[in-house]
Image (spheres, rainbow, N blue to C red):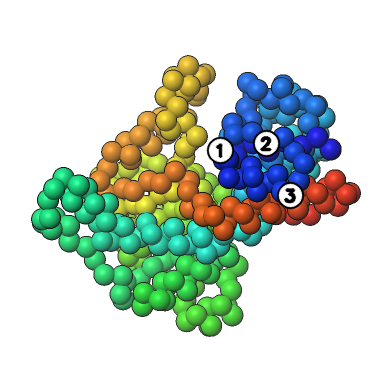
Amino acid sequence: MKTAFFELENHEKEFVRKGIKADLFSFHLTPNNASKFKNYESIAVFIHKKIDKNVLKKMKRLKLIATMSTGYDHIDLEECKKRNITVCYVPHYGENTVAEHAFALILNLTRKISQCIERVKSRSFSSIGLIGIDLNNKTIGIVGTGNIGKHMVRMAKGFNMNVIAYDLFPDKKLAKELKFNYTSFNELLKKSDIISLHVPYNKNTHHLINTKNIGKIKKGAILINTARGALIETKALIKALDSKIISAAGLDVLEEENFIGEEIKFIKSKMNKQDLKIILEDYSLLKRDNVIITPHNAFNTKEAVERILETTIYNIKNFMNGKKVNAVKF
């Protein structure tokens, strides 16, 4: 089966070569280059570009899409279903990895680490304006207590934080073991000093934080998102920052993040007004001192990446042998 991996760094290519015979590329698969890969039957992609109808229609022989991620909202599942294309994903790879990054954002914001570094780089050791806050005895609200959320609870307990959580399917055994309480979503917004999002993106979680409920957030709270950008309505976040409902935000993801840094492409593209508006709002977040944005990097450790690649290779090899593992159910 002719296979291609996209969006690989050099060290990742070395790892993949040891596990499977495939063509390895550093660039993205897009509608503009998809026709060059029309004879490929399986592809491995990451999340940075959408694999939609415009890509799939140029790859008539495609049978398998193996996404190197847990989420698969970047893939047009309806079109895959019509074409009988199997989609596989990576269910587990870095639960602790993403949680560690979320806490890195929390610590950076609560202790003003970025500002401290910039202050020293400017040859000043003044601590004026750099006062932080303790995590000890603060309340953290964790939205989603799946694999990543569970690690967040454990880490928060290590800082002696009060933990409350919201989940559609509460894990009562875990709550008893780790001594935290589940509450309603609105109560979590109302009581939390820090809110951290750890849910998948779907139609039910689209704009989970929005203009209608963001005013319910405890004044001065910190908002953390290492899940998916569209969980937060960007317009609502900007208004909450301006009104100081939210004192700071740590974001590893943004709505329409794929266009950040690609100004020429989106200026030339036929983009609808709403998407363009979101992109401009994203840019306004980049300029704020109380907002830290990292480039969808929460997953990116040596150990986690190797687990991702191992599972992706495993998924493809099993498909070649007639078995569907870690397949998305349409």
Task: Tell us which disc is closer to us: 1 or 3.
Answer: 3
Secondary structure of residue under mark 3: loop
Gap in Å between the C-alphas at discs 2 and 1? Answer: 17 Å
Q: Which residue is mark 1?
A: 48
Q: Amino acid at mark 2?
A: Leu
Query: Viewed as shown, does residue 9 lie left or right of 160?
Result: right
Q: Amino acid at mark 1?
A: His
Q: Can you say whether 54 is above or below 212 in the image?
A: above
Residue shown at the point (76%, 46%) measured from the top left: 20
Gap in Å between the C-alphas at discs 1 and 3? Answer: 24 Å
Secondary structure of residue under mark 1: loop
Q: Amino acid at mark 3?
A: Gly
Q: Earlier in the sequence, mark 2 or mark 1?
A: 2
Q: Position of residue 28 (x, y in %)?
A: 60, 32
Q: Which residue is mark 3?
A: 19
Gap in Å between the C-alphas at discs 2 and 3? Answer: 12 Å
Query: Viewed as shown, does residue 253 lie left or right of 21?
Result: left
Per the rendering, the mark at residue 24 is 2
